[in-house]
Image (tube, grey):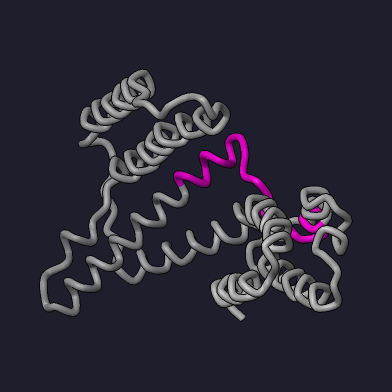
């Protein structure tokens, strides 16, 4: 079953539970889904637990009695038994952001170049990409991510705070981008321009996706 199918089946089984069993089981579901466990295996385990709850329910045993009376403690044991996604932190986190942005850049280059080629247009100008563009995409993606994520993290840490616009973060981001653009524009005659065919761009995009999957988002045991 796919992850989506397992979620749908889980929802269907929960509808057959008594209100008390459903409430208890949903606490486990929320805890597991909010953790860093591999999503597919997490949903697979939750589906097994849902079936166990229904089997116990038919025998007159509650979910609370089945799982030891503490939903969070049991959910924690489930999370510890499943493979988790290794968190990306520090410099590796920022490299991942730039890597993902450049992967998207080469995907766009490949799509536009191949479309122009098959449509019969001259794609020679579309196949050119400058070092300046690469720098701007990499630096800009990091700045934009920080601009979005930091206010969200602060909001998550404090339930009482209302979301607002972080003018300081926006100002710093704009200043950094202006500096990068000024430097890039000043060096525009010194920075090289590469001719990359759509097929090469597609290969670079595929390499980028594989890198994200196997370098940055590799799994580890808890």
Question: Foreground: 101 or 155?
Answer: 155
Q: Residue 127 placed where, x, y %?
A: 23, 61
Question: Foreground: 8 or 192?
Answer: 8
Q: Give the main secondary structure of the magenta stretch.
A: helix
Q: Is 4 on the left or on the right of 202, as rendered? A: right
Q: Is residue 62 magenta?
A: no
- Residue name at image x 29 percent, y 61 percent: 108
Quadrant of image for the N terminus: bottom right
Question: Foreground: 73 or 101?
Answer: 73
- Residue name at image x 29 percent, y 44 percent: 133
Q: For residue 37, say whether it is visible.
A: no
Q: Residue 119 placed where, x, y %?
A: 14, 78
Instruction: Tell me: residue 187, above or below residue 11.
Output: above
Q: Residue 45 placed where, x, y %?
A: 74, 68
Question: Foreground: 196 or 151?
Answer: 151
Q: Is 115 on the left or on the right of 66, as rendered? A: left
Q: Residue 195 placed where, x, y %?
A: 27, 58
- Residue name at image x 61 percent, y 35 percent: 90
Q: Is 22 on the left or on the right of 116, as rendered? A: right
Q: In this picture, which residue range is highlighted in magenta?
A: 78-98
Instruction: Tell me: residue 98, above or below residue 38.
Output: above
Residue, far top: 168
Q: Is 121 on the left or on the right of 94, as rendered? A: left
């Amino acid at each position: 079953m796919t992850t989506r199918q397992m979620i749908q089946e889980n929802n269907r089984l929960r509808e057959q539970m008594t209100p008390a069993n459903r409430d208890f089981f949903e606490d486990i579901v929320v805890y597991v889904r909010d953790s860093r466990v591999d999503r597919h295996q997490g949903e697979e385990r939750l589906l097994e637990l849902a079936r166990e709850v229904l089997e116990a329910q038919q025998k007159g045993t509650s979910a609370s009695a089945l799982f030891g009376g503490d939903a969070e403690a049991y959910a924690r044991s489930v999370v510890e038994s499943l493979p988790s996604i290794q968190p990306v932190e520090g410099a590796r986190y920022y490299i991942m952001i730039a890597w993902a942005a450049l992967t998207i850049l080469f995907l766009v280059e490949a799509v536009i170049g191949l479309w122009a080629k098959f449509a019969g247009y001259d794609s020679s100008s579309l196949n050119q990409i400058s070092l300046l563009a690469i720098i701007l995409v990499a630096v800009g993606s990091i700045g934009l991510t920080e601009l979005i994520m930091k206010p969200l993290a602060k909001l998550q840490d404090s339930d009482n705070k209302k979301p607002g616009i972080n003018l300081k973060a926006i100002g710093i981001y704009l200043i950094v981008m202006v500096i990068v653009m000024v430097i890039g524009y000043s060096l525009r005659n010194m920075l090289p321009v590469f001719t990359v065919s759509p097929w090469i761009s597609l290969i670079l995009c595929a390499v980028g996706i594989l890198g994200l999957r196997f370098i940055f988002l590799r799994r580890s045991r808890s």
